[in-house]
Image (tube, helix red, strand yellow):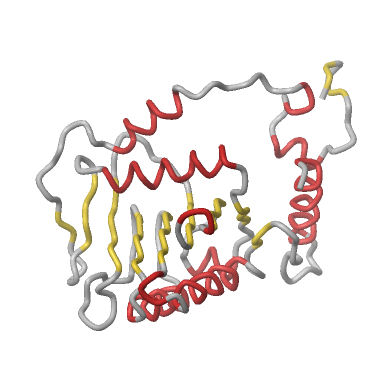
Amino acid sequence: MTDQELDRMLRRALLDAADQEAQTPPETEALWVAPLSYRSRVLELIEAETAKGEAGRIAIKVNSMNDIGVMTALIRASRAGVRTELFIRGICCLRPGVAGYTENITVRSVVGRYLEHSRIFAFGEGAEQRIFIGSGDLLNRNTRRRVEAFIECVTPETREGVLAILDALRADREKSWTMQPDGSYSRAETVPGTASHDTLYEYFGEKTVEPLPPEKKHGWLWRLFHPNKKKLHGNEA
């Protein structure tokens, strides 16, 4: 799918959501769009991993989580043997490590130098692993009321970068806190030099950034609502 096709798809979804007569954004080919399909797609993928039993793997990075349906599905996955890693900086209403329920779930909060907001969902392992990035947390307001969008990472370069974020979070022993079964957080002995924010700053700082082509010099939001404009204030759009 080309950038132009994605632009058209997202534009249609957002404009339909803004229409006072529209109840929800429409289904799309490549996007999860809340409140219609974000929550349902997450639940489908959790259930797919649950069916794998102990071979199932889930990793989720969001800022907060309180959606009862998603938490219930994660408990079912844990009871089936699925190993689940939750990287949740803020509110998390699911307690990990509870015998018989969430013993296969870990919850870690990383609070460091940057107030970063990446949201990542990874299901499975290896070449069959499916990875998604987008805008929404797993709060009720995100899954039920707000317009949010997610897309699957399919190119090797994109997948590599997103997985680097998860790997850095796993290795962080300097700025991370681990939730206990009683809901409290504890920090193990710190290991200087493992802070994920610093690791990722260096990792992405070393990446070569290609110059933007002329058609992308305006921000994505401007391009979203001005798809046919070629000039702005005498400059090429």
**Residue 186, image x, y percentages:** 15, 56
Horizontally, residue 68 falls left or right of residue 136, namely left
- Picture coordinates of residue 210, whole percent (x, y): 63, 21
**In this rendering, is residue 201 above or below 66?**
above
Name the quadrant containing residue 99. bottom left
Q: Quadrant of the C terminus?
A: top right
- Give the x, y percent position of residue 157: 56, 37
Q: As drawn, which residue projects farthest toward the left?
A: 189
Which residue is pictured at 74% across the width and 28% down the height?
Answer: 216
Describe residue 225's horizontal placement relative to residue 104 as left or right: right
Count of numbered circles on the image = 0
Q: Position of residue 115 (x, y in %)?
A: 39, 40
Q: Residue furthest front?
A: 127
Q: Quadrant of residue 97?
A: bottom left
Which residue is painted at 87% across and 23% down in the image?
Answer: 231
Taking the view exactly as shown, the residue that stands out farthest to the top is 234
Name the residue rendered at 63%, 64% in the picture: 34
Above or below, 235 against 178 in this view is above
Viewer-nearest residue: 129 or 66: 129
Residue drawn 47% across the image and 62% down it: 124
Residue found at the far bottom of this picture: 100
Q: Tell me: 141 left or right of 56.
A: right
